[in-house]
Structure formats: structure tokens, C-alpha cells
Amino acid sequence: MGSTREDGWLVRERAPSMSNERAQFIQLTYMHLAGAILAFIGLEYVLLNVINPEPILRLMYGNGMMGMLLLVVAFMAVSYIAQMWARSETSQAVQYLGLGLYVVAEAIIIMPILFVATTFPQAGGYAIVYQAGILTLAVFAGLTLTVFMTGKDFSFLAPILSIGFLLGLGVIIAGICFGFTLGLFFSFAMVALLAGSILYETSQLMLHYRTTQYVAAALGLFASIATMFWYILRILMILQGNRE
């Protein structure tokens, strides 16, 4: 990269292709994110309306505490494999396989709460699911605009998020083992933690991801959005139950 003199000032030449490449990468990331969200919605529709969800629910939750622990461990293992595949440098097909695997895993793990919400009127019905979806997308849009308008690097959140998610996982496992219910405070805390994750992931795609990693970037954002949707839906259902 050279430099030129212009009006008495030394002006360093810039590579316009870099900014264009980054813009194209961001566009591809959000296109893949939109595709993942639409695929998730389609899978949930199939799980809830086309096939009978009750056998899946019995398989997931019919074996008591040990079954629920195995479900959590299985989801963590699948999530790890999916993210590893999405970051693969060997094949783009493997990257898409990782994204697809994660979308399927999220659809299965979120299906039970959607089944309860849409089956039992006292839980809120489809209206409360739509409210949760709108709130989730509104929060995501606000956080995304914050990062792009400020240009701030939220990489400093990485250790805070790691510790927070480990603590949250510990509380979930303790709740399964000792039979206590995770209340509103825990759900609000997880929403706040996931908001931080969206800030972090968005700043990473804007500043740090390689421009070939749009599948991995889309998966990172989708993971935070889907999990936030679960907790927002849970909060609304608890509040709906308290009003009854």
C-alpha cells in the first residue's frame, strides 16, 4: 500500500475493496441468519402441526431427572459439533451442515415450551408466542443498531459472557437435580446475558470475523436470538400465569 501527496498533505492510499468486502460479508451473514430463522419457524410448524409431538416430548422428558440431564448434555454436545463444523476451513458444505444441525437442535429443544404455550389457553396461546417473537426481534434490532451506530468493539464482554453462561448452566443443572423452579429473576438475567452476547457477536462480525466466516457468524447470532426467544417466551408465560 503506497501513499500520494494531495493538496500539500500526505494521503495514504486505502484499499476500497476491503470495505466493500466487509460490507458484502455482513450482508451475507444477515441473509444466512434470516434463512436460519425461517428454517427454524418451518421446523417448529412441522413439529407442532404436521407430526404428533407427544412421542418426542415423552422421549425428551419422560425419563425423569436423568433424562433431562442427558438432554442438556446432548444439546451441549450437538451445539459444540455444529459450531465446530460452521467454523470449518475445509469445506463450505461442512459449514452449512453445522448451521443446519444447530437449527434442528434449537427447534427440538424449544418445541416443548411452544407446545405448552399453544396447547393450553391459560399459557397464552399463539398470541403470546407472537409477542415473544416480536419482542425478541425488537431487542435484537436495537442491539444491532447500537453496535453499528457506535462502532464500539464489545470484545471485552467475552470473559463476562463465558462466566455468566457457565453460572447459568450450573443453575439449570442444579434446578434439574434438586427440583427447584427457575423463576423470573433467572429468566431476566439470562435475557440480559444474551443481550450482551448479541452485542459481542455483532461487533465481532463488524470488526473481527474473517470475511469467509459468514456461516459461523450467522450461527453465533442465531444461537443468541433463539435462546433469547425461549427466555422471553418463558417470562411472558409466567406473567400470564400470575394474572390468572
Image: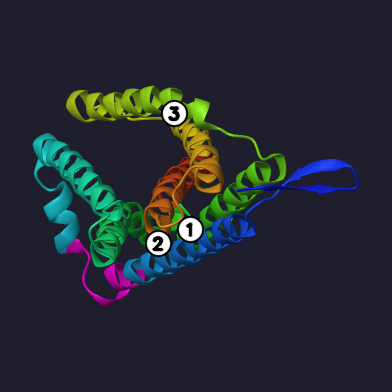
Q: Which residue does the numbered mark 1 point to in the structure image?
A: 129
The Cα–Cα distance between marks 1 and 3, rounded to whole angstroms, is 30 Å
User: Could you tell me which residue is drawn at 54 percent across and 51 percent down?
Assistant: 136
The circle drawn on residue 158 is: 3
- How many other residues sit within 10 Å of disc 1, few (<14), some (14-19) or many (≥20)? many
- How many other residues sit within 10 Å of disc 2, few (<14), some (14-19) or many (≥20)? some
What's the residue type where badge 2 is placed?
A: Thr
> Start and end of the magenta stretch?
45-54
**In x, y percent, where is residue 160?**
45, 23
The Cα–Cα distance between marks 2 and 3, rounded to whole angstroms, is 36 Å
Front: mark 1 or 3 = 3
Q: Is residue 34 visible?
A: yes
**In x, y percent, where is residue 153?**
58, 34
User: Could you tell me which residue is drawn at 27 percent across and 55 percent down?
Assistant: 89
Image position of 116 with respect to 47: above or below = above
Identify the secondary structure beneath mark 2: helix
